[in-house]
Image (cartoon, rainbow, N blue to C red):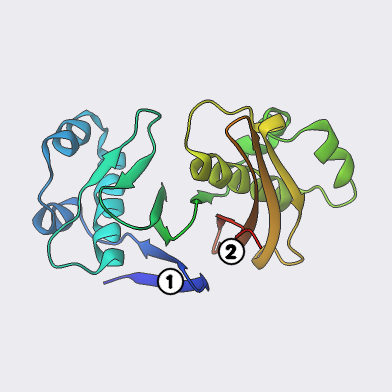
């Protein structure tokens, strides 16, 4: 089975990445979908169905339980595990799916290289951030900004967010393929700093936003 990454990035935060090589039926044979999942699955187009199923299967693998633990969805759309003592986040893009588990607020994003991000970068990178990183702004950094802010958005998970103003990238990793930077969520109900763990596999960018523990 193609579980290609299982890595602890801190004592209580671990992420998993699965390379999807299986057919859709493999996941259907492994999973029993609840009513909500069946309805959601039925609305998806074919290419998205396999990603959806693989993501749920990877979560099951990550949890390591015999019986499947089903996701709950908050009113703001954030997935969570009922009666579980940790936070989760999920992401998928084409041939890869990703899951992270943590004891603190956490978000994960996986994104295949996409030329569209260059064209719309002004929608998620603020003028201030452009100024800070003007000398190093390139395609890879644009993808890091997108993934990092998506991960921050998922970690926050409590409603509408303005990516340019509410989510800040305050430090870029020295190595975007495997490094750690810093980010911040600035909302009325949450003002918090996050470590931003950056990884790259083939042409996929991975970002994990992990809330810093208060000292």
Kindly state the secondary structure of the residue where label 2 is placed. Answer: strand
Quadrant (top left/top right/bottom left/bottom right) for the C terminus: bottom right
Around disc 1, counting alpha carbons within 10 Å, would you say few (fewer than 14), some (14 to 19), or many (20 or more)?
few
Which residue is drawn at the image coordinates 37% and 32% (left, top)?
77
- Residue 152 locus on image (x, y percent): 57, 44
Task: Report whether residue 93 is seen.
Answer: no
Q: Are marks 2 and 1 in contact (CB under 8 Å)?
A: yes
Quadrant (top left/top right/bottom left/bottom right) for the N terminus: bottom left
Circle number at residue 65 = none
Task: Report whether residue 116 is seen.
Answer: yes
Q: Nearer the viewer, residue 89 or 125?
A: 89
**Horizontally, is 195 left or right of 99 in the view?**
right
Kindly state the secondary structure of the residue where label 1 is placed. Answer: strand
Above or below residue 174? Residue 145 is above
- Residue 39 locus on image (x, y percent): 16, 31
- Residue 209 locus on image (x, y percent): 57, 53
* Tag 1 residue: 5
- Residue 115 locus on image (x, y percent): 62, 40
* Tag 2 residue: 199
Which residue is drawn at the image coordinates 17% and 32% (left, top)?
42
């Amino acid at each position: 089975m193609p579980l290609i990454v299982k890595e602890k990035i801190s004592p209580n935060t671990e992420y998993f990445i699965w390379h999807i090589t299986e057919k859709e039926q493999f996941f259907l044979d492994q999973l029993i979908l609840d009513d909500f999942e069946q309805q959601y699955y039925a609305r998806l187009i074919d290419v998205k169905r396999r990603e959806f199923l693989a993501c749920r299967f990877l979560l099951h693998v990550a949890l390591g339980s015999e019986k499947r633990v089903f996701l709950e969805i908050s009113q703001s759309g954030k997935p969570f595990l009922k009666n579980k003592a940790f936070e989760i986040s999920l992401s998928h893009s084409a041939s890869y799916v990703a899951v992270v588990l943590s004891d603190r607020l956490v978000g994960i994003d996986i994104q295949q290289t996409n030329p569209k991000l260059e064209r719309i970068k002004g929608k998620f990178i603020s003028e201030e951030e452009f100024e800070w990183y003007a000398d190093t702004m390139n395609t890879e950094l644009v993808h890091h900004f997108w993934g990092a802010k998506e991960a921050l958005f998922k970690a926050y998970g409590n409603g509408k967010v303005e990516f340019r103003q509410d989510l800040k990238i305050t430090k870029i990793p020295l190595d975007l393929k495997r490094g750690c930077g810093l980010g911040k969520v600035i909302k009325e109900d949450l003002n918090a700093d996050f470590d931003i763990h950056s990884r790259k596999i083939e042409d996929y960018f991975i970002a994990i936003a992990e809330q810093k523990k208060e000292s």
